[in-house]
Amino acid sequence: MQTSALPDLAHTDTRPMHWLATAAAMAAVVAGAGLLQPDSSASASTPHRTAAEQQHVDQAVAPDPAKAAFPLDCGNAGDTVAKQAPGDLDGDGRPETVAVVHCAAGSGTPPSGVYVLTQADGAAPRIVATLVDPAQLLTVGDFAVRDRVISATLLGYSSSSVPSCCPDQQEKVTWQWRNGAFVRAGEKAGTADAGV
């Protein structure tokens, strides 16, 4: 067996001072790592989503209007969810669903109801606000939920002599959650296009 030509290395000799220095160095590394943690909002575990991806996530966890009971008197015809959009309207981190619902009429233009749904874990969706009541005899044209604002074009009639197929008035409205209630804002847009 050949002996090494190198001198004995100091670190192979374990003395208490050596272990104390090693422990102090390790403590400094651990403490430094704790101080240099990345911002939680920029963490790799936090996905960065496009608007379309976020909408998909919202739809996946938002209340399903097909499972809700709407206060419509449709007889045997039943009701139809014509439009729906999810969104966290009150900023609590849980999305609601806004649904435009009307009776399933074979023809004509049945009046719409616009409802806000919420859902507790494991419970059925429930209506927490009625934004448009079908008794108002309005239908809904354009409809969207963006940045906690619900927007819609409401189509109505100037008199009972106007055929129900052809609303002749429209109003662009928005609703936004403020101080515990949905606050409506809007402006009359005048005569509706017959093709709407």
Image (tube, grey):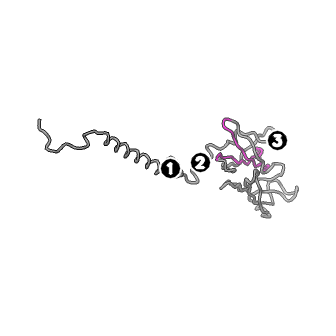
Q: Secondary structure at mark 2?
A: helix
- Residue pictured at 64% horizontal, 47% vertical: 93
- Residue pictured at 83% horizontal, 52% vertical: 136
Structural crowding at the residue carrying mark 1, measured as other residues with C-alpha within 10 Å and reported as few (<14), some (14–19) or many (≥20): few
Q: Which residue is mark 2?
A: 56
Query: Is residue 177 or residue 54 the one in the foreground?
Result: 177
Marks 3 and 1 sit apart, C-alpha to C-alpha, by 50 Å
**Residue 155 on the magenta segment:** no
Marks 1 and 2 sit apart, C-alpha to C-alpha, by 21 Å
* Stretch in magenta: 93-122
Q: Earlier in the sequence, mark 1 or mark 2?
A: 1
Residue 101 in picture, x, y percent from top left: 75, 46
Residue 73 circle label: 3
Q: Earlier in the sequence, mark 3 or mark 1?
A: 1
Residue type pointed to by label 3: Asp
Q: Which residue is mark 1?
A: 43
**Residue 114 on the magenta segment:** yes
Q: Is residue 17 left or right of residue 86?
A: left
Most distant residue in the bottom direction? 190
